[in-house]
Image: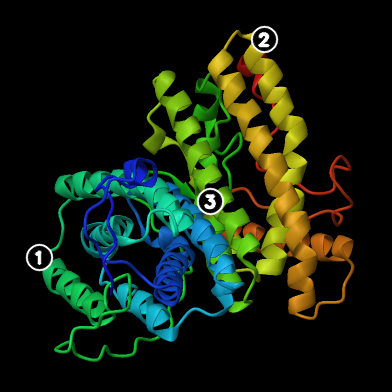
Amino acid sequence: MRAYRSSSDPAARRLSGQARPRTYYTVEQSATICQNYFALEFELFTTLAGAVPVVADLEAKLALSHHLHSGMLRARELRARLVDFLIPEPEQKVPERWANFVRHLMTAPDDVTLLAALWRVIRPAQLHSYERHLSTTLPVNDAPTAELLERSLPGLRAEIDWGRDYLRRKEVPDTAGAFLAAIDEHLRALGGPMGVLVPPDAATPACYPPWRPPERMALESRFTLQSADRYTLPDWPEYEAIPTAYTHFTELPVVDIIGVTVFDGRALQMPFEYFADFTRQLWDEARHTQMGMERLQAFGIDPYAVPIPVGHYTVWANMPVLDRLASLTQVGEACSFVPKRQWVAAAWKRRDALSALEHEYDIVDERMHVRFGARWIPEIAARVRDERPVKQIVQDADWAFRERINRLRQQAGENWLEDLGERFKGCGTNTSPVSLAPALDGIPNIIA
């Protein structure tokens, strides 16, 4: 290591020419460190997206979804920097030691311990490494790395502060301490997030097994109506009492469904853009849930008394990802725009601007989600060697969802159909009941 002289402030030392002795990294060292940073960020956001359904607490579920999107943005910037170092597509070259580390994390005995390991051990270690790297790398020569680290720090600090505050308010199991210490020691044995200086006394980490998302989503028990499908009249007469009736809060399971969609891209070795698209949708669905919750609370409705169709997760998340995206994005989302625009018009008619804007902003996001599905369905079909035309894939997937959700409705004692009707022929043909927005029909007080 050689000495380099500059001021202590990264921005100032790039401009002032003032100096002090310092060490620095060679190009090879910087490339290796950035590759390790990327590997950890990538493994965390793509794996923990699949763990969103494990998190029962709504507050943590939504915050984690947002934080994972921030982690994806950090990974995307690191990925761009690695191209400068002639390391393209690093998501296809993640060292096994980082994958194994995150598999260790996924052995957490419960969701609170998992989150405690993330927010008390891993994120603080990343923050420390990024701060140290920023203060020691050459501020002009390696300015692209320095500046991306500077951009990363505020978000990491905010996430850690949020996580620590959340954990102070939660009952962290007594057994969590030993698990956090094991995660900390494993990370130390890898040389920390930088991954370059392994302590000589560090033990060789054990090998950890693959992990899979759960078949059923976890949700707080305070949700008193966890249904198979979306409740409609006459299943839930109280539906008429909600002035805005339909809010995106009832789409809560889609958060978990999209989290699993991010995770499932790993087995298919999808390009980074796939993970970026669906991690963005993960955050969008968390925001939509929050928007709906705010509207319910504004009308004096207890969100925890609203029926949540957890069966949507049970069906969609357990379908092959090709069928899931075909049914969810090309039917459930694509066919929701007509009723959503009706909800917008009804809200403006009653001069309820915030409810109208809830739906209008949702439409902006949903259009993008439909494009995500249309973009990746052919790519996934090619990877799994499915030669059906996309139109046929969508029709078959819609039918599979309808069959499975109908069985769940019957098992749950909810309204179910003896005859599912005809197969899907496209939005606007009334050939599928699958939509993420219910029609206004039968709810007269909404349009009065």
Q: Which of marks 1 and 2 is in front?
A: 1
Instruction: From the image, tell me which residue sits under label 1.
Output: 174
Instruction: From the image, tell me which residue sits under label 3.
Output: 282
Residue 218 picture location, percent across and down: 39, 58
Assign a secondary structure to mark 3: helix
Residue 58 visible in the displayed image: no
CA distance separating discs 3 and 1: 31 Å
Image quadrant in which the N terminus is located: bottom left
Dot 1 crowding, Cα within 10 Å, few <14, some 14–19, many 20+: few
CA distance separating discs 1 and 2: 54 Å
Q: Which of marks 3 and 1 is nearer the N terminus?
A: 1
Residue at image position (13%, 74%) is 178
Residue 247 picture location, percent across and down: 55, 31
Relative vertical location of residue 355 with respect to residue 217 in this rendering, above or below = above
Q: Earlier in the sequence, mark 2 or mark 3?
A: 3
Foreground of the two, 94 or 308: 94
Assign a secondary structure to mark 1: loop
CA distance separating discs 2 and 3: 31 Å
Residue at image position (16%, 58%) is 172
Image quadrant in which the C terminus is located: top right
Instruction: From the image, tell me which residue sits under label 2.
Output: 349
